[in-house]
Structures are given as structure tokens and as C-alpha cells.
Amino acid sequence: MTAARHIMTPDPAFLRVEETLHSAVSRIQELDVESMPVCDSDGGLVAMLGQRDIMRQVLAGGLGRERTTIGELDGDKPVSILPDDSAEGLINIMIDHRLRRLPVLDGSRLIGVVSLAAAGEAMPDGDVALLIEALSIP
């Protein structure tokens, strides 16, 4: 089976904890992605942040998008994978956690991101049912 290191997007775009919400939303929209990794100054993964997360916290918490930084948001510990994890294992993680993108870590440092599409392309033909289930993630 193909390993994450062979199908990941290396050196992915990410947000920094000191960026403002306004900047984060602009970058997410510019790149046309649902979520992005958030890293500290050392490149360590802190969270995965999506537009829904931002909207929920801004609306519920009354946060100002011009002054509030990404680091001020409450977030769950991100689900991540290692470079040698298999494509089949990745899809199972994506299904279990309802994710379309998984950060790949070397220690705590972000080195890549695997998308559901990339993991699906790496699956053997016999595992189409697993891919179909994964693609039904909202």
C-alpha cells in the first residue's frame, strides 16, 4: 500500500497563530479550501481551522475579525498522520473523524497534507467501497 509521504502535498500552505481572523478567512477563500493547518512559529501543528470554525466562534463569541488572532480561538487537538501511514489507514481515519484533509507530521512539525482525493487515487481497485464511503463525508 502507498504511504502518506508518496501522496501528500509537501510544504502545504498554512496559517500562523499570530494571523488575524480576517487574514485567515481571506487565505482560506483565496486558496479555495475548506480548512487549513495552523502552525506555531516553529512550524508545529497547533490546529486545523476551517471557515465554519471561524464563523461559529466569531458569531458565538462576538470576536472581532480584524483584531482577533488565530491563536486566540478555541480549537480541538488536530488529527494527524505520520509519513509512513498507509493510504487505506488514512481513509479510515478520514471516515472516523469526518475529515477531507489530514496533516502529515514529522515529530510535531507539519511536512505535508493528504487530501481525500489523493488517498483515494492511491487505493487499489478492490477498495472502491471504502473510497465511496469516504467521499460521502459532508
Image (tube, rainbow, N blue to C red):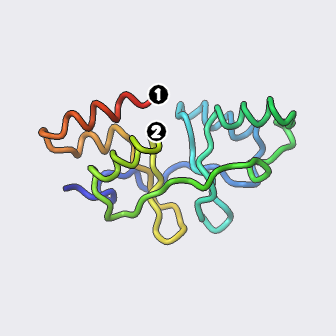
Q: What residue is disc 1 on?
A: 138
Q: How many labels were placed on the picture? A: 2
- The x and y percentages for residue 88 are 26, 50
Neighbor class of circle 2 (other Cα within 10 Å; few <14, some 14-19, many 20+) is: some
Going by the picture, which residue comes out furthest to the bottom?
A: 107
* Residue at 64% across, 32% down: 52
Going 54% across and 34% down the picture, which residue do you hit?
34
- The x, y position of residue 75, in whole percent, is 68, 49
Measured along the vertical axis of the image, is residue 20 above or below residue 83?
above
Whole-percent x and y of residue 49?
A: 62, 43
Query: Label 2 amino acid?
Result: Arg
Q: Is disc 2 placed on a helix, strand or loop?
A: loop
Q: In the displayed structure, would residue 17 be above or below residue 94?
A: below
The residue under the point 42% across, 44% down is 96
Q: Which mark is residue 98?
A: 2
Report the amino acid beneath label 1. Pro
Which residue is at the far front?
Answer: 96
Mark 1 neighbour class, 10 Å CA radius: few under 14, some 14 to 19, many 20 or more: few
Q: Which of the pair 110/54 is nearer the observer?
A: 54
Q: Nearer the viewer, residue 24 or 130?
A: 130
Numbered tag placed on residue 74 in the rendering: none
Q: Position of residue 74 (x, y in %)?
A: 74, 48
Quarter placement of the N terminus: bottom left
Rendering quarter of residue 25: top right
Q: Secondary structure at mark 1?
A: loop
Q: Are marks 1 and 2 in contact (CB under 8 Å)?
A: yes
The residues bearing labels 1 and 2 have C-alpha atoms spaced at a distance of 7 Å
Give the vertical position of 123 relative to 59 (above or below). below
At a point 18% along the width and 40% down the height, the residue shown is 127
Of labels 1 and 2, earlier in sequence is 2
